[in-house]
Amino acid sequence: MMESGIRVVIADDHPFTRYGLRVLLESAPDITVVAEACNGREAVQQVLELHPDVVVMDVRMPGGDGLWATQEIQRVRPTTKVLVHSEYETDPTVMAAMRAGASGFLLKAGDIAQITSAVRDVA
């Protein structure tokens, strides 16, 4: 079966967050979650293997944080867009991730309807 629409990888160290994002994103008919990653290194590996359109990336994770992973994804596959998400709007890591090439930013506490819109906007 061919996948169409926007292909997404979710990278977050919290399984509950990954699950919630997957359910929310897959409720949109034009978005397919192709993989999940629990750290930055795994996210980069998934990008290399699956060539997604967008990575929804937590900025603070063990095993290669979102900042490192964003830089690496921009280096190895610049056509994949990174949408960072964080608990804190003023998190300096978020600003650093944006400077490293992230295409957008979402607050974890924000309106859940914004997530699908943001994925579409950066894709």
Image (cartoon, helix red, strand yellow):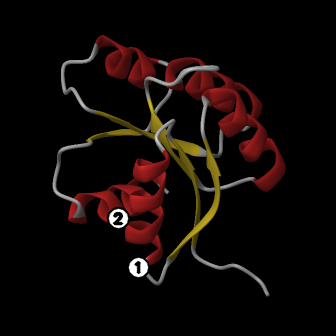
Quadrant location of the N terminus?
A: bottom right
Give the numbered dot on residue 3: none
Residue 121 falls in which quadrant of the image?
bottom left
Helix, strand or loop for disc 2:
helix
The answer to whether mark 2 and mark 1 are in CB contact below 8 A is yes
Decide if residue 21 is on the left or right side of residue 87: right
Earlier residue among tags 2 and 1: 1
Residue holding disc 2: 116
Residue 106, given in percent of the width and then of the height, sits at 28, 42
Residue holding disc 1: 27
Residue 69 falls in which quadrant of the image?
top right
- Residue at image position (46%, 59%) is 19
- Residue at image position (16%, 56%) is 111
Return the residue found at the far bottom. Answer: 1
Helix, strand or loop for disc 1:
loop
Residue 101, given in percent of the width and then of the height, sits at 50, 27
From what the image shows, is residue 51 above or below residue 3? above
Residue 113, given in percent of the width and then of the height, sits at 22, 65
Residue type at mark 1 is Ser
Q: Nearer the viewer, residue 33 or 13?
A: 13
- Residue at image position (43%, 38%) is 103
- Residue at image position (42%, 51%) is 16
Residue 31, given in percent of the width and then of the height, sits at 51, 72
**How much space separates mark 2 and mark 1, taking CA atoms?**
9 Å
